[in-house]
Every structure is written in C-alpha cells, then in structure tokens.
C-alpha cells in the first residue's frame, strides 16, 4: 500500500513539473540559433527573391504596365523612323533598303524579340547598280504563322515584301509596309498579270529582292501548309508555244530577265519562335505566337506584348535555281520540303550548327557578314 501511494505521488509530481509537448516544441524552436546564409551566395539570393516575389495581382499589373510602355514606345518609333525613310525614298542608292531593316529591327527591339540566324543569305543588298553589274536577284520564300514574321524577316533580309492587300489598311504594319515599298497583291485573276509585271520590274530594274509567303495564309505554327505554285510564276514564267510571238513588246524588266543567269534564285527560309522568356517553346506555348484564321489582331498584340522576352530562329536554306526544275509545281514542292523540314527541326529544339554557317544577330545589329564584306570593299 505504501509503495502504491509513493508511485502515484511521483507520477503526479512529474506530470505537474513537465511542460506540455506544444510548449516544449515551441521553446526548442525559439532557442535554436539561426545561421544566416553567406552574403552573395545562391541561398542568400534565393531568399531575397522569395521575399520580394510579387503576388499574382502585382505581377499582372507589371505585365500590363510593360505592355502599355511598349505600345507607347512603338507609337513614337514608327512615325519617326518611317518619316525618315520617306525622305530616303527621294534619293537613289541602297540607303532606303538598309534603313528599312533598321526600322524593322527597332520594332523587334521594342518587342524584346531576339533573332537568331542560322545559315548564309543568298544575294546582296540589291539596288539598280547591282543589277547593272549582273547581280542575280533573290526571292525568299518562308513559312508564315504570325504577324511577327514581317518584322523578323524584315530585320534579317534586305528585301521587300509581297503581301495581301488587307495589310495595307493595318494601323502600324500597314504604314511601315507602304513606306517600305511593299507590293500589295489581290486574289483577283484580273490583276494577276499587272502584279506579276510589277514584281518583275522591282526585281530586275529597281534591284529589289522579294519575300513571299507561298502558303497563301498563316498557319497555327505546328506545321507548314503546302506552297501554292502560282507564287513561283515570277521565277518560272509560262512558256509560249513554238512559233507564237508575244502579243506585246517585251518590257525592260523582261529583257533583263532574258539575259543568261538573271532568273531569280529561290531561297527557302524557315522561321520558328523557339523561346519565350528564356524557356523553350513547347506545343502548349506555341499558340502564344500563332495568329491565324479569324483571330483579331488587337487582342493578340496586347497579350503578346505582356511577355518579357521572346526569340525567333531564322534558318536560311541553300538557294534553288529554277532552271533545275521542270515546272513551277516541282519548284514549289522542293521549296516546301526544305522549309517544312527545317521548321520541324527547329520546333523540336534540335541544335543547329554554330560554326561557319551560323550567325547570331540582335535587332539593330545592322548588317550580316556578307553585307559588311561588301561595305568594306
């Protein structure tokens, strides 16, 4: 009996003196020594970033402010640059061609759109003197998935676009395209001959190179649509039957095109948008860039301008000689295969050679290596 009472007393005493488990745990945590990470270490930077990370609402406000700021900068840049280009149109030479690339490059810079170029560009800057020297004109044919293709290719290639007439009425792109001497074409058969003559005149007499989108429309970016052979009529005009004379006397452009080695070269070009804020673009992110079908331009531009940075890769394939193909259809098929295969590799993020055939450029970099060689010479 005495032993039982003593054991009970000891049990109550211990229970009364011992703190509760919760109090003990908090006390132990409070007594721990906090060791701060070393200044400048990865842990210190991570803690600093976590402490200032904005909430979802603050992040959305920042994206909206970024979009508004870019729109304001574009509104200032486009009228000033286009106004200066309008003055350059009054003077001969290639200054207007080079400045057009600077205009598109400035637009890419304001969009935080970096450009990576892989391959060698066929042809030079062009101009009347280049055609008088016998420099062969070039027609660049590319896939088309978004309105961003215009400033990207305009930055990389010293050429003029052949675009559908609807673009002429666009607020910013239309103004830059008109001053940049874009050739606007319609889908009416009645104007096909006149538009082909204008393109031939620009190629042979004015000395311009041209950029075509032979798909005829924009795609969703997941594949390259078949090329329409009608876009290659300028490189392989229809032949007259034996013994039949042309109804009209050949124009100056037609006479130049009839000279040996003056038929325009066709260079296939693949364009893919492969990075978004430094992260490779996968299938889920590809619709961020794609603009096609009945999508409205304004909302798409607004959403695209909210992203911090983007990157486009332009793959320049070896040029094709139209004389090596029996028909326009065969030429269009060969160009489509090159563009489609190149775009598929870029979408899969397959590394491209970065040695002699690659040249990474930034907007406003000015000229590609062959341009620098001609300028120095």
Image (cartoon, grey):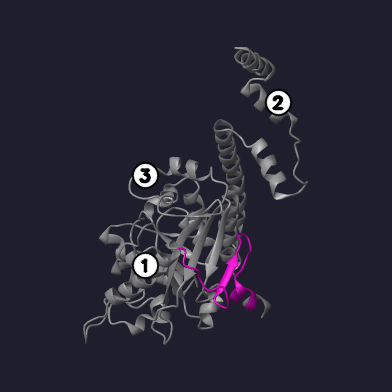
Assess whether mark 1 and mark 2 are in contact (beta carbons under 8 angstroms): no
Task: State the residue position of label 2.
Answer: 27
How far apart marks 3 and 1 lie (CA) works out to 24 Å
Residue 207 appears at what percent x and percent y? Answer: 50, 73
Marked residue nearer the N-terminal end (3 or 2): 2
| Residue 52 relative to residue 230: left or right | right
Task: State the residue position of label 1.
Answer: 340
How far apart marks 3 and 2 lie (CA) works out to 62 Å
Residue 279 appears at what percent x and percent y? Answer: 53, 54
Vertical order, 372 against 283 (above or below): below
Quadrant for the N terminus, please.
Answer: top right
Residue 278 appears at what percent x and percent y? Answer: 56, 54
Number of residues whose C-alpha sits closer than 10 Å to that of mark 2, classed few (under 14), some (14–19) or many (20 or more): few
- Residue at 49% across / 65% down in the picture? 314
Marker disc for residue 107: none
Residue 128 appears at what percent x and percent y? Answer: 53, 74
Task: State the residue position of label 3.
Answer: 295
Viewer-nearest residue: 178 or 321: 321
| Residue 164 relative to residue 26: left or right | left
- Residue furthest to the front: 1
Residue 142 visible from this viewpoint: no
Assess whether mark 1 and mark 3 are in contact (beta carbons under 8 angstroms): no
Start-end of magenta stretch: 349-373
How far apart marks 2 and 1 lie (CA) works out to 67 Å
Which corner quadrant of the image does residue 270 belong to? bottom left
Marked residue nearer the N-terminal end (2 or 1): 2
Residue 359, magenta (yes or no): yes
Residue 321 visible from this viewpoint: yes
Q: Which of the two marks, 3 or 1, is nearer to us in this view?
A: 1
Q: Secondary structure at mark 3?
A: loop
Marked residue nearer the N-terminal end (3 or 1): 3
């Amino acid at each position: 009996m005495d032993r039982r009472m003593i054991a009970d007393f000891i049990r109550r005493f211990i229970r009364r003196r011992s703190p509760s488990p919760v109090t003990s745990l908090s006390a132990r945590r409070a007594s721990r020594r906090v060791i701060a990470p070393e200044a400048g270490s990865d842990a210190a930077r991570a803690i600093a970033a976590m402490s200032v990370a904005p909430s979802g609402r603050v992040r959305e406000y920042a994206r909206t402010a970024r979009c508004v700021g870019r729109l304001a900068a574009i509104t200032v840049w486009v009228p000033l640059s286009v106004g200066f280009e309008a003055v350059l149109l009054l003077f001969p030479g290639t200054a207007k061609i080079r400045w057009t690339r600077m205009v598109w490059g400035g637009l890419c810079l304001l969009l935080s759109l970096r450009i990576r170029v892989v391959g060698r560009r066929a042809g030079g800057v062009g101009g009347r003197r280049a055609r008088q020297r016998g420099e062969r004109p070039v027609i660049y044919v590319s896939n088309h998935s978004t309105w961003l293709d215009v400033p990207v290719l305009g930055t990389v290639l010293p050429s003029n676009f052949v675009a559908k007439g609807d673009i002429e009425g666009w607020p910013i792109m239309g103004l830059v395209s008109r001053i940049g001497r874009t050739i606007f074409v319609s889908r009416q058969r009645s104007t096909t001959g006149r538009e082909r003559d204008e393109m031939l005149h620009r190629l042979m007499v004015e000395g311009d190179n041209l950029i075509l989108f032979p798909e005829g429309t924009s795609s969703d970016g997941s594949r390259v649509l078949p090329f329409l052979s009608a876009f290659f009529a300028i490189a392989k005009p229809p032949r007259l039957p034996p013994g039949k004379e042309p109804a009209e006397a050949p124009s100056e452009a037609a006479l130049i095109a009839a000279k040996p080695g003056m038929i325009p070269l066709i260079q296939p070009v693949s364009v893919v948008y492969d990075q978004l804020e430094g992260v490779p673009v996968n299938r889920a992110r590809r619709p961020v860039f794609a603009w096609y079908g009945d999508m409205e331009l304004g909302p798409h531009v607004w959403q695209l301008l909210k992203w911090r940075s983007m990157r486009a890769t332009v793959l320049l394939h070896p040029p094709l000689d139209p004389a090596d193909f029996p028909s326009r259809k065969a030429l269009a098929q060969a160009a489509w295969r090159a563009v489609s295969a190149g775009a598929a590799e870029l979408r899969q993020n397959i590394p491209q050679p970065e040695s002699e055939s690659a040249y990474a450029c930034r907007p406003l970099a000015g000229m590609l290596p062959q341009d620098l060689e001609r300028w120095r010479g």
